[in-house]
Amino acid sequence: MLEAAGVNVRFGGVRAVSQVSLSVTRHEIVGLVGPNGSGKSTFLNALTGVVPASGSFAVDGQAVSLGRPAKARAAGVLRTYQTPQVYTALSCVENVMLATAPRRWMGASSAIAARPRMIAAERNRYSRAVEMLSRVGLADLAGAPAAGLSYGDRRILEVARALAGDPKVLLLDEPSAGLNEQETARVGAILAEFRADGLTLLVVDHKIEFVSKLCDRVVVLALGEVIAQGEPADVWRDQQVIDAYLGLEDA
Amino acid sequence: MPGSEQPATAGAQTLWRPTLLARRGHKDVLPDVYRRHDYSSISIFVVIVLAVRTLFVSGLSAQDSYNLWLIYAIAALGFYLVFGVAGRFAFSQTFMMALGAYLAAWLSKSVPVWQAMLYSLAISAVVALILAVLLIRTNEFYFGIATLAIAGIGTLVFQNWTAFAGPSGLVYNIPSIEIGGFVAETETDFFWVMLVGVVVALLVVSLIERSPLRREAIAARDAPMVARTLGIPVAWIQVIMFVLGSVFAAVAGSLYAQWQGVISPDTFGIDLSIGIFLMAILGGLGSMWGVIIGAAFYVFIPQYLQSFSQYQNIIYGGLLVVILILLPEGLVGIAARVRDARRGRAHLTTGPGGNGGVLHWLAEAVSHARSSRS
Amino acid sequence: MARFVALFASGISFGAIVAIVAAGFLVLYKATGVVNFAHGDLMTAGAFVAVWSIDSLHLPILAAYALALVVLWGVGMLMERLVYAPLRHRSMMVIVIGTLGAATVIRYTLAVWQGSTPLQLQTPVGTDSVWHLLGAAISYQRTMIVIVAAVVLGFLYFLFYGTSFGRQVRALATDRETAQLQGIRVRRMAFIAFGLSAALAALAGILIAPLSSVDLTLGFNVMLTAFAAAILGGFGNLTGVIVGSLIIGLVQQLVGGYVFLAYSSALPFVVMLLIMVLRPTGLFSEEARARL
């Protein structure tokens, strides 16, 4: 489903991600872990065109050019961010509606000259967005400004927004960061529920417990390179992985 | 930027009470913004404008200011789209006014006035489209500087291109508006024309705001990269908003030329550019009514400060800074804040930087107080 | 040939002025992140204060110049207190609009104080005296401009790269938050940067004023030209800004002098717009992308 090969990201002279290859098959949940600064988030940024990168990337067998956010989105790759990027100037439901396809009757001319069609499309988006919000338990807050949400709810809203875009592959950037145990569990439960629907997921995180519970397979990055991969339980026993984590804690 | 500020406290969401519709299970409805009563508001606005004119506006100079207010309101509504909704920091609004004015004046030498106006708008729209396509990808300050440079080049061209703009950019005897049998001759005639102009402008803004375009423009403004990863065509949306807003300015400019009969590059100088910023900031960018009120202040306040007239621009500049410091959401922002506080809910703002209303404001005030103590 | 030499010389001297303006601009931008739209009006103010010191206070010319620099340093600091400090926690866009307000206040305060009739600023080398090079007459004023600019820019190099002030400014420009954590006193730096930047603006205003006359629009076009130079130079370091300024100065004088006489002052803008069209994200891009 998702195939990335030889992805490189450079910031000035620093190699943040170097020759990372990774694939996620349909309905699989893969965890991408590693110590801070190992390039996990940068890798997601590379795939979604947020930072310039080189390498090859394909979704569903179709090549996707790197460095172009719109291309990644069009290929069905949606994502969340390390700090939840919800639009505080919009309501919750409007946040979700930003992602709902198809993009038809959205321009200035239909806003002025084809209102019935535009409104019909909006109703459709609205009901789908609210449906998504009720699945994640935020339906009551649909019309509320996203600015009023707690941090945990913002995270969930962001996940709901990404899910509303019918992702072929969903990329989550540290979904548990900044959340307490209860909130982490809520996010985990939501993801588990969507997994039953056949969600394909790549999760960057460093909470071992969260990743172990959720993921079928784990890939470990250190200093921008893949150092291990396999089933979660096996990977944690890998000496290289232990060294990478401990080595960083010493420093 | 969304998400970058301190998360609101856990109790915050209780401030918002679900609407009846929300509790009924939201089948087949639309976001709140579609339930705004814009048509009633615009009708009430027209009634108020007529009533105030009948009751208080007498004498030529008062009528003159009243018309000037309506013209500035059209240009400022355009700026609201460009700067308020799309968040583009642009100095080109007065340049587009000048372009509309000079084009209308020049074209009306050879074609009937109504055609001259139409062509002037069309050409202005094309110019705005070209500028936007070339420059929209620049970051906010580059864009500001670029549009300032374009305004500078425009002024030079209008001053020096005698065949187009007359000696030193001075154009006299611009024919008056003429549509069908109607010829605008008196201040009252022009008042009606400009009132129609403002109402059309308000309607267009209202239609845009009650459409997906507002939502996506806000998304593109507040976090462009996030918007791109959601599949929103950020550059294109900003181009559309820029062209629309610029066309409003061109309309205002050409109306001005036909109304006054005389234009010069100074009519649309840097002072008016800053004036338009002042209208927007003073009234607040939270809604389209903000700029209308801002424009009114800009035009009418000097009338009451006749004895300070030489200090007028100093006061304007100072006011701009003071408003920024004390009233981040402008005059309309206060009204909305009071209203929403009474209803017990956080309010949504549209303006750049104004995200989240009361809660956000409180959170900011608290964190500000904290950081200044440490 | 003589014409070319004359145009080349005036290109270099105009470039030197632009470099001082752009450097002042850069100091502030590096230390605070603020793009100051009042910079041009600070220039104008410097020239006006110098004229006033000579005409009304009857100070010797150089003393009047010095007084203008000191006064404008103060105006810069005042601006920091009244405009930047209260808005420092708001978005950069809000601060920049604040500087627009300040620009208006400065300009019209000058108008009320000195009127809008153009004034003449005296210079220690005399306005009409010239020397000759390859048949071209080059004024002493233009020569002095180049020398003063070289000295001032040399001093700025030393300040940027040879002092702790410079290190702190560069640290702030790279990463404000980290710099703050490392104990750099951000507020004090802003205070000094506003003063220094305004004084540099005033110096440019004093140097350019004797070439024409002192009126309210003196600084505005030069400021825009300096924006163009800074953008051409990549908005990054002093060297880039100086090179950009000289290129802009030469383009304006040579191309403008030979071809587009009426539009010569628009040439820098055209160059700037071309750069923006070709490299729309400029050097801000990496920074902006990394920050998301």
Image (cartoon, grey):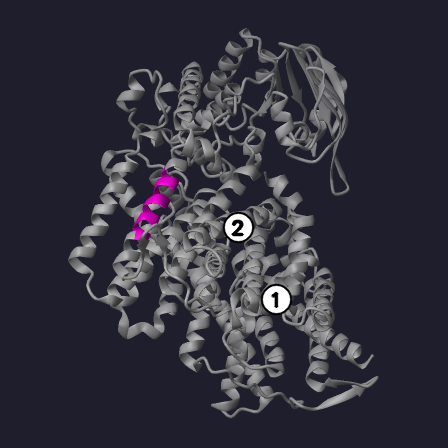
> Picture coordinates of residue C286 (x, y %)?
66, 43
Q: Chain of mark 2?
A: B
The residue drawn where x is 38% and y is 68% is B313
Residue type pointed to by label 1: Gly
Q: Residue furthest top?
A: A196
Q: What numbered label is drawn on residue C24?
A: 1
Q: Is residue B195 magenta?
A: yes
> Picture coordinates of residue A15 (x, y %)?
76, 36
Whether residue B41 sits left or right of residue B206 in the image: it is left
Asked where in the image residue C198 lies, by quadrant, the reply is: bottom right
> Picture coordinates of residue B366 (x, y %)?
38, 44
Magenta segment main secondary structure: helix
The residue drawn where x is 52% and y is 85% is C119
Of B340 and B366, nearer the camera is B340
Of A59 and B78, nearer the camera is B78
The CA distance from mark 1 to mark 2 is 39 Å
- Residue behind mark 2: B123
The answer to whether residue B296 is above or below residue C61 is: above
Whether residue C153 sits left or right of residue B162 in the image: it is right
Asked whether residue C79 appears in the rendered view, the answer is yes
Q: In terms of secondary structure, where does tag 2 sit?
A: helix
